[in-house]
Image (spheres, rainbow, N blue to C red):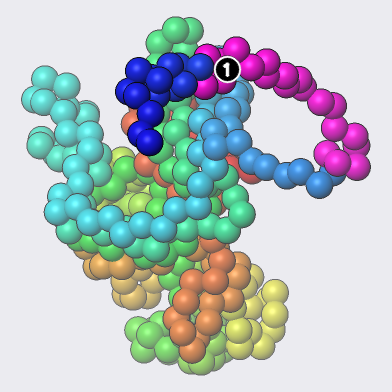
Amino acid sequence: MRPPRGFAKTALALICASLFTSTVQAKMVELADNELSEVTGQAFINLTTGSNAGINYTRVNFGLNVETQLNIKKLQLGQYNDSVTRPGEALGSSDILINNFALGTVNADDTINPFLELAYSGNRVVGMRIGFGEAKGVLSGDIQSLTGNLPIKIEGTARPIFDQASFFDRLLLGVAGVTRDTRLQADAALVQTNGTADPTRATSAGMVNGQVLGCVTGCNLGGLSNALLSLFASNGCQILSLTTCFPLGNFQSLPVGNMAVTDSASTAAIEGAAKGFFISMQTQAWPGVTWTAMP
């Protein structure tokens, strides 16, 4: 026999009442040291602070490992109007201008990776940067102008230098223990087309005036080879009529990684991650705002 509807409502009300009036007991329980040793974790957000030369810094680290493929048709930062253009810079130019910008496979393992950092003087924000604790991958694009630091290594055999050298210069190279197959290397920086260092709205990268090539392999006289190579310093973006500076537009793809770690020649993979990959915006030039290296 089906129970009356009123009886069903009464029974349901009694069940709900018993649930709400039941006593729930819970309390914090202390874990023993051996139990705590089995627990690990990482906060999603980690906050660090610091100061340098009167500027305070607050960094917000995000506990994430990120893999991304970022494409921007035109990346343009730091273009001022006519009344506040940078002194000595071309009107309408930008601190950073990269067409067809792409950033691929930026990642890291077991690190606090993406971060946002603010620099402030008193209660006023004077700088901000966004970056990665570690990064490896490829940055590509048609670089028109760049402000900051772009570490590049120039490396190759000494053959082009021999081809441009006079008989006397070849004799000096021979005395230095340098042959056509000797591998030479130098660190490149952002420069003007005359070889002067230029970290602001630069359009070229290469050897700074006075910089010399160093031996990597095939140096028959060891340290003496480097000493004698100092006679061949870059001047005006040339060493013995050999070009040592190049337009940034020539660097279509730049590997981002730790060059101290040997890459795999068979896979062309970037094995090591680079620290300190970031883009910053600030109202004070260096050394007013000095971004510290990643730990």
In the picture shown, does residue 145 fall above or below 81? below
Q: Name the image quarter holding residue 151.
A: bottom left
Q: Which residue is mark 1?
A: 18
> Which residue corresponds to the image point at 33% horizontal and 52% vertical from the top-left?
191
Q: Name the image quarter holding residue 54.
A: top right
In the picture shown, does residue 81 fall above or below 223? above
Q: Quadrant of the C terminus?
A: top right
Q: Nearer the viewer, residue 52 or 70?
A: 70
> Which residue corresponds to the image point at 73% horizontal and 21% vertical from the top-left?
26
In the picture shown, does residue 19 fall above or below 245? above
Q: Quadrant of the N terminus?
A: top left
Q: Name the image quarter holding residue 123.
A: top left
Q: Nearer the viewer, residue 158 or 278?
A: 278
x and y, in percent, of residue 277 in the image: 45, 49
> Which residue corresponds to the image point at 31% horizontal and 59% vertical from the top-left?
69
| Amino acid type of the residue that numbered disc 1 sits on in the rendered structure | Ser
Q: Is residue 31 magenta?
A: yes
Task: Look at the numbered disc 1 and give the secondary structure of its residue.
Answer: helix
The range drawn in magenta is 15-36
Query: Would residue 130 be found to the left or right of residue 221 on screen?
Result: left
Q: Is residue 283 magenta?
A: no
Query: Would residue 136 be found to the left or right of residue 293 on screen?
Result: left
